[in-house]
Amino acid sequence: MRVRVRSAWRNHTRNQGCDPLRLSRPESLEELVELVREAESASVTVRAVGSGHSWSDVALTAGFLVEPGGLARPLALEPELLRDEVDPERLARCEAGIRLRELNRHLDTEGRALLQMGGYDAQTVAGVLSTSTHGSGIDLGPICDFVRSLDVVASGGAVYRIEPADGPTDPEAYAARHPDRALVQDDRWFDAARVGMGCLGAIYSVLLEVCPRYWLREVRTLRPWGELREELRGRELIARHRHFEVYVSPYSLEDEDSCLVTTRDPTDEPARRPRDRERNSIPEFVAGLSITPHVLNLIFDLRPALTPRLLERALGALADEEYTNLSFRVLNIGTANLLPAYSSEIGVPVDAHGSHIEAVERIKRIAARRREIGSVYHTSPISLRFVRSSSAFMSMMEGRDTMMIELIQATRTEGGFELLAAYEEALYDLGGRPHWGQVNTLTGSHDLIRSLYPRLDDWLEIHGRLNASGVFDSPFSKRVGLAVYPREGVIG
Ligand SMILES: Cc1cc2nc3c(=O)[nH]c(=O)nc-3n(C[C@H](O)[C@H](O)[C@H](O)COP(=O)(O)OP(=O)(O)OC[C@H]3O[C@@H](n4cnc5c(N)ncnc54)[C@H](O)[C@@H]3O)c2cc1C
């Protein structure tokens, strides 16, 4: 196992960083177990990280940081350990540090694909599960809903395979092969472990449900926001498409108030195989504005008053586009992910009272007020994605169909973080749940987390088993009140 000391760790945007005691790169399950045991005996905490694509502090540690690169391979399925009724064609096993990008490529060579992903593919499998990363589609849950089994190294170096009660592993075959490991087939354990923010142990491997390779056709249409807003109160339009997303400007201009609707639906394989990139958001975005993203950032900084008009133009430039390709190429929105930006994202219930519509209107009011009083601007369109309810206890989608509101800011936005905090506070009483992996100001005070997550106590009970010693505590888990902390003399 490669171990480094006196090395800093930074996330991909470099808005988060820490100086862990050690950065370790285990290459096997045994090395991961050894690392957790060593940390516990030295009273140091452990945090497994992914590819650092969280804008929040969720991956930080002052203890031992576990890098993902040595545990990033596709794994054999081991069909002899599965129950007879399981269809092996619909399952794929991999080490948890593999990035979605490499997993997609691997599955494609087998003529298979992930059923769902978010708008990017540079994150690791463990990373996207742990924060309840999602895409769009009111009949598709977050990515953690496509997990069928997890192998986790817990407190004491104990290895657990965690599955729902009807999980795919054959208990007898597993016990015979791995007498030193525990198979837990229990819905509560499974619903806790799928979204653990790194606090429920280090995930070694994952069994995912997959499907045969498929093609998607993406269509983008400009609509007046006032008109679409009323249609979004009902579910009919949202449920008509496999994927449904909206970009809306935070500003209502007198002459223009449009939004961009993106739909993606399965389609037949095209006669001519498309190139990997025939649609790319940033070139379109930039083409519409005739400037590069960095110049754009500079304008947001130096001439912020131009922002509302620029955003309106950007939406217009992205409209009337069609794009057909393999599912994972269409779902990845491409180089838009490389914009110098940071983001927060808040999930609100899609309900009959129209809480989700009120949430957007509130955000627009806050943006307008901050602009009027302090010349503070929101420097990107607001993204709305509809996601099916999940049973994972700490998922933002737990127990309710959800509209995720993504609030992106160019890095040079003056007052950008303060604006995001204002949105977050304003949405709590509409049931707003901030994305664990994106900028948030959640605290452990006033029982805030309990008020947001009705199944918190179930999660904490399993947390108490998997993190009995507090070895998976972190600055993040202390901030939001999930840690076993305080414990005397523990580093990290
Ligand atoms: C450009 C960009 C695009 C994005 N697009 C989307 C999107 O479309 N939808 C969406 O919902 N989010 C999106 N996000 C947010 C992102 O998906 C999440 O923050 C995700 O958790 C990052 O994964 P990662 O592999 O980088 O993990 P990290 O950010 O490194 O870690 C995230 C969490 O996972 C835990 N973790 C990582 N590995 C393990 C392991 N082996 N065992 C236990 N815990 C582990 C860490 O401890 C931490 O708590 C985006 C972020 C960026 C920067």
Image (tube, rainbow, N blue to C red):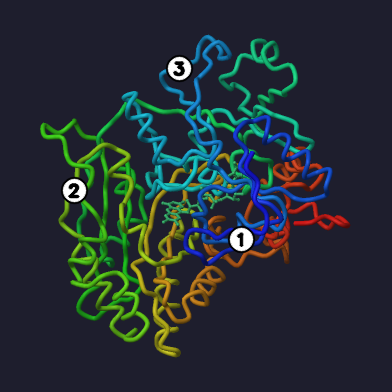
Residue 291 horizontal side relative to residue 492, left or right = left
- Which residue is denoted by mark 3 in the rendering? 88
Image coords of residue 250 (percent x, y): 36, 72
Element carrying mark 3: helix
Q: Is there any visible trace of residue 139 in the rendered image?
A: no
Callout 1 environment at 10 Å: few (<14), some (14 to 19), or many (20+)? few
Position of the C terminus by quadrant: bottom right
- Which residue is denoted by mark 2 in the rendering? 278
Look at discs 1 and 3 and give the one toward the viewer.
1
Q: Where is residue 309, by image quadrant?
A: bottom left
Look at discs 1 and 2 and give the one toward the viewer.
1
Q: Is residue 485 above or below residue 266?
A: below
Callout 2 environment at 10 Å: few (<14), some (14 to 19), or many (20+)? few
| Residue visible at 61% across and 42% down in the picture | 25
Look at discs 3 and 2 and give the one toward the viewer.
2
Residue at the left extreme of this rendering:
271
Q: Is residue 333 above or below residue 139?
A: below
Q: Earlier in the sequence, mark 3 or mark 2?
A: 3
- Which residue is denoted by mark 1 in the rendering? 8
Image coords of residue 282 (percent x, y): 26, 61
Q: Earlier in the sequence, mark 1 or mark 2?
A: 1
Q: Is residue 296 above or below residue 162?
A: below
Q: Is mark 1 within 8 Å of ligand 1?
A: no
Residue at the bottom extreme of this rendering:
373
Callout 3 environment at 10 Å: few (<14), some (14 to 19), or many (20+)? some
Identify the amino acid type marked 2.
Answer: Glu
